[in-house]
Image (cartoon, rainbow, N blue to C red):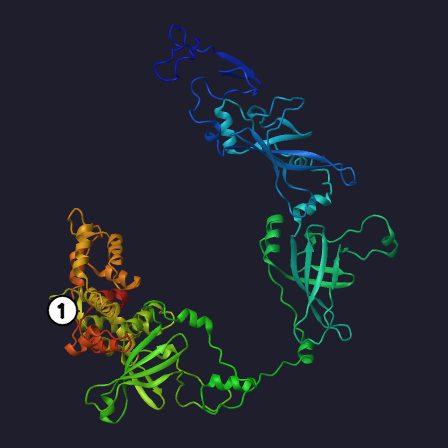
């Protein structure tokens, strides 16, 4: 190499090239053998015994502390610790994990923690580079760690027995063979000659079964003795040291003083040892887990304790250990003496209700001197309170049953609140009728008619099972007939059909099926008579009026009006009418919220939609449309927004046509409901709170139930009575 002229600056063009005149550019190959592994290295100098793990000219460009960051080789090993002060053994086997960090060649030794082991576990050797024994400049490296090798860290010999999958793959790629895992010495001892009895190791048993307790339930029958009784016992068997303790459970107000323990924790002998053996000699055999089972009898120092049941942990232990699969619980004997001795506390009888205030409020004032607020069913309130559009309020339209012609024309709304089982009655007043609309009866619990109110116990009240179309309710001596229900009430009862038989389509069809099967040629005549009633132009459809007449002829008084409504709703055959009605209903709700929020920015919304549609396809995805509507601050909540997006027109890829949405939000055209202009102005334009004004739409809903079509073929297919025609013919 030429010497640089110090007078010249260290800049390009002012220095000579040291490679000029050189002819040989090769690197001298240097081979070495380390622990029977042939390796090609670049530099023999250095402290490390393994200068490079890569072939020459193939090393990575990144440094090792970046390439091998968080790359750890994990080995499983053990070492034996001597016990100088323990007579039960001379050493103990301790299992550890050896971690080798590839980024800097450091080693860390950790021992998994065992509860109540009495040993200092955790990190035994902190992360550091460890020197080889009898060496000052050589450290442990990758080639020194492998299965079957023994390593010495600070005077302790560790035997490596296994490694994880990442370590095995990494060493195999380096060309190092990794042997199969080696079992621990304690596992080898268990697989030796089985003819020798296993050596009892109390400390190992304590470590393996600490905090594991078998729990049995039993009794001791002491009724043969004077003043004896039946003792309910709970038996605990501790697997850690084979000891047993027994506790006695006493019922409340039993008149007996509970002792601290029926039997303190000890090794329970199978037989009572003689007094001479208590002073010394061999150990007395005690009860073991093999002696305990359901139905077994334990001799507790002369007292026969019968085991009747056990807990799930005990059942699983015997299933895994002994292969038991059947655990039949034994019945406890009846203790007749206890019934005679301990008299049951009589139920407190309250004075009769005087009718002032609610029954719950009066009962609370009778139970205590200090008046307290009544306790409502809080769990039911949480489950049945209003959640979004799910109001949990069943609303029915009703008429008065009266001889007065003026009362017959009055129209009422009856609300049943599921959160507290209360009923509220409202009247929809008409102009020049002489009756004011509004609250007719305040919201409270309504009791059944013809019951005695002045009794200590609360009289029966109306429940949600009594709310169905066609039923009659007597509220404060006014008799109402439920003539219709809103969409939410009908839908709620259909979704919870197991609670409401009137809305259970399976029960209704089964009732019709049994009635037709009981009549001679009933199903055959029924089908033949009304087959011609099917509308010719509409295939398989029959008018609702004809369908209702056919069912009334065969069912007579066996079917209620609500069951007819359920059938008509289930077999509705009007093509496209249901979707149109739902669209207009959602549109009416959207108009109400937009008018209440004073939103009228359709032109800016159109500009935003056209700007988002870069390709001019006329459609946008549902997520993009929802994002744009929220960005333009439409004053509607998330639930109503999802309902609006679900009724808009979409293409084959489920993308929304935004022109249809702009017409949906057009304030010039109102929703297509058969309302008068005055009602429309009241419902939509002025946007009052959504309470009883929606009930004015029920008259139209009633007319729709009476009109329309029913799918006759689907009804006959659901009946599934074709076999009766063949049998009767």
Question: Which residue is found at the position 38% from the left and 75% from the top?
Answer: 418
Q: Is residue 433 left or right of residue 359?
A: left
Q: Which residue is mark 1?
A: 535
State how many labels appear. 1
Q: Is residue 167 above or below residue 328?
A: above
Nearest the viewer among 714 and 430 is: 430
Q: Is residue 368 above or below residue 228?
A: below
Nearest the viewer among 620 and 319 is: 620
Q: Secondary structure at mark 1?
A: loop
Q: Looking at the rendering, in which quadrant would you find the N terminus?
A: top left
Q: Is residue 43 above or below residue 478?
A: above
Query: Which residue, as the protein is rendered here, is positioned at the far bottom?
Result: 404
The image position of residue 97, as x and y in percent, is: 60, 36
The image position of residue 480, as x and y in percent, is: 30, 86
> Does the rendering let one see residue 725?
no
> Does the rendering let one see residue 675?
yes
Nearest the viewer among 245 and 323 is: 245
Q: Looking at the rendering, in which quadrant would you find the C terminus?
A: bottom left
């Amino acid at each position: 190499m030429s010497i640089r002229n110090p007078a010249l600056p260290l800049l390009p063009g002012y220095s000579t090239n040291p490679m000029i005149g050189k002819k040989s550019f090769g690197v001298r190959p240097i081979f070495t053998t380390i622990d029977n592994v042939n390796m090609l290295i670049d530099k023999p100098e250095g402290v490390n015994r393994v200068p490079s793990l890569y072939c020459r000219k193939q090393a990575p460009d990144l440094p090792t502390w970046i390439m091998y960051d968080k790359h750890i080789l994990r080995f499983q090993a053990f070492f034996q610790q001597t016990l100088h002060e323990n007579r039960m053994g001379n050493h103990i086997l301790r299992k550890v994990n050896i971690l080798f960090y590839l980024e800097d060649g450091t080693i860390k030794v950790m021992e998994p923690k065992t509860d109540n082991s009495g040993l200092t576990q955790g990190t035994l050797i902190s992360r550091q580079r460890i020197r080889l024994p009898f060496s000052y400049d050589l450290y442990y490296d990758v080639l020194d760690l492998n299965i079957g090798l023994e390593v010495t860290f600070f005077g302790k010999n560790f035997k490596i027995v296994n490694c994880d999958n990442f370590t095995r793959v990494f060493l195999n790629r380096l060309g190092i063979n990794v042997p199969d895992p080696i079992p621990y010495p304690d596992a080898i001892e268990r697989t030796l000659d089985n003819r020798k009895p296993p050596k009892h190791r109390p400390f190992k048993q304590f470590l393996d079964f600490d905090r594991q307790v078998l729990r049995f339930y039993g009794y001791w029958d002491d009724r043969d003795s004077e003043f004896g009784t039946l003792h309910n016992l709970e038996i605990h068997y501790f697997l850690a040291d084979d000891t047993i303790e027994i506790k006695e459970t006493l019922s409340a107000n039993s008149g007996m003083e509970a002792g601290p323990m029926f039997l303190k924790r000890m090794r329970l002998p199978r037989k009572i040892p003689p007094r001479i053996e208590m002073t010394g000699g061999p150990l007395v055999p005690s009860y073991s887990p093999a002696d305990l089972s359901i139905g077994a009898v334990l001799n507790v120092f002369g007292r026969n304790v019968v085991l009747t049941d056990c807990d799930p942990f005990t059942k699983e232990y015997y299933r895994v250990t002994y292969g038991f699969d059947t655990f039949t619980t034994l019945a406890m004997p009846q203790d007749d003496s206890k019934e005679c001795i301990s008299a049951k506390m009589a139920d407190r009888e309250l004075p009769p209700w005087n009718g002032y205030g609610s029954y719950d409020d009066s009962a609370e004032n009778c139970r205590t001197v200090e008046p307290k607020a009544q306790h409502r069913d809080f769990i039911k309130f949480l489950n049945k309170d209003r959640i979004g559009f799910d109001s949990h309020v069943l609303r029915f339209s009703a008429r008065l049953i009266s001889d007065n012609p003026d009362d017959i024309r009055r129209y009422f709304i009856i609300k049943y609140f599921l959160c507290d089982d209360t009923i509220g009655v409202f009247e929809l007043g008409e102009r020049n009728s002489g009756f004011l609309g509004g609250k007719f009866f305040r919201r409270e619990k309504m009791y059944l008619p013809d019951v005695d109110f002045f009794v200590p116990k609360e009289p029966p009240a109306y429940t949600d099972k009594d709310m169905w179309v066609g039923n009659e309710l007597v509220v404060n001596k006014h008799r109402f007939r439920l003539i219709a229900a809103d969409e939410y009430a009908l839908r709620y009862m259909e979704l919870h059909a197991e609670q409401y038989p009137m809305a259970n389509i399976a029960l209704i069809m089964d009732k019709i099926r049994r009635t037709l099967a009981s009549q001679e040629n009933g199903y055959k005549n029924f089908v033949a008579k009304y087959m011609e009633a099917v509308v010719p132009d509409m295939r398989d459809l029959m008018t609702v009026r004809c369908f209702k007449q056919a069912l009334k002829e065969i069912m007579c008084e066996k079917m209620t009006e609500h069951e007819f409504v359920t059938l008509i709703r289930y077999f509705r055959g009007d093509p496209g009418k249901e979707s149109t009605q739902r669209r207009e209903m959602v549109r009416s709700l959207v108009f109400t919220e937009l008018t209440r929020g004073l939103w009228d920015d359709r032109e800016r919304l159109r500009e935003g939609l056209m700007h988002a549609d870069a390709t001019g396809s006329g459609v946008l995805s549902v997520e993009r449309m929802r994002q744009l509507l929220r960005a333009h601050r439409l004053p509607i909540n998330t639930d109503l927004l999802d309902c609006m997006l679900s009724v808009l027109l979409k293409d084959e890829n489920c993308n929304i046509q935004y022109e249809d949405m702009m017409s949906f939000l057009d304030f010039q055209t109102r929703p297509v409901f058969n309302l008068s202009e005055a009602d429309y102005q009241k419902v939509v334009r002025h946007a009052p709170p959504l309470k009883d004004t929606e009930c004015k739409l029920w008259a139209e809903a009633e007319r729709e139930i009476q009109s329309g079509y029913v799918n006759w073929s689907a009804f006959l297919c659901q009946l599934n009575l074709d076999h009766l025609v063949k049998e009767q013919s």
